Amino acid sequence: LLLLMSVITWGIVISQSLQLRKARAEAQTFLDVVRHSRNLSQIHEVSQRLRNSPVAAVFVSGHHELTQIVESKNSRIESGEFGDIENVDRALRRAKFEELTRLEKGTTFLATTASAAPFIGLFGTVWGIMNAFIGLSKVKSSSIQAVAPGISEALIATAIGLAAAIPAAIFFNIF
């Protein structure tokens, strides 16, 4: 179980690192376009190509909602309604939440591994020591050779638990 948790942890770490690297690069590209352009349509066109940028995705969502308000402006004025800028705010908040959820994918598993793996390793340690004492009771002599295999298994379980938990805790905090 601990080896599986460790493998999954490293898979998440590699995947998240690549995803965040792409997101940072595309976000920087988007921000450069925003700095150099005053045309919302041009910014929107560029932002639709930047699929990994969370900033561009939030912009696209807000731009879409704002475009709908502008297109329906004439009908709202005729009916006595005014442009509902709160819809843009809600669209931006929803897009922000979706992007955060996308970027945080897998971090829950890292947190679970960081907190549970040491206890699973400790359980393996206790089990190994119990086996060592059971083995000791079956032999006539009480030498180190009688308990060494069980204690070494116990220490290996502890090491694997820590090997799974430590990277999970570190990368959870990084991500």
Image (spheres, rainbow, N blue to C red):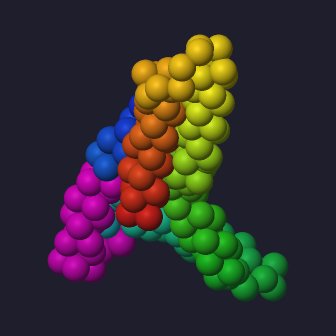
Report the front residue among 145 and 60: 145
Residue beneath the point at 26% across and 72% down = 31
Residue 14 lies in quadrant = top left
What's drawn in magenta, residue-wise? Answer: 19-41
Say whether residue 83 is magenta.
Answer: no
- Rendered view: 159 above or below 61: above
Report the front residue among 100 and 120: 120
Report the front residue among 58 and 103: 103
| Residue 66 left/right relative to 130 | left
Find residue 167 and report its horizontal and vertical position in percent.
39, 50
Find residue 122 and report its horizontal and vertical position in percent.
59, 43
| Residue 33 left/right relative to 103 | left
Find residue 11 and report its horizontal and vertical position in percent.
39, 35
Report the front residue among 25 and 127: 127
Main SS of the magenta part reads: helix
Quarter containing the N terminus: top right
Residue beneath the point at 60% across and 22% down = 136
Find residue 102 and report its horizontal and vertical position in percent.
51, 51
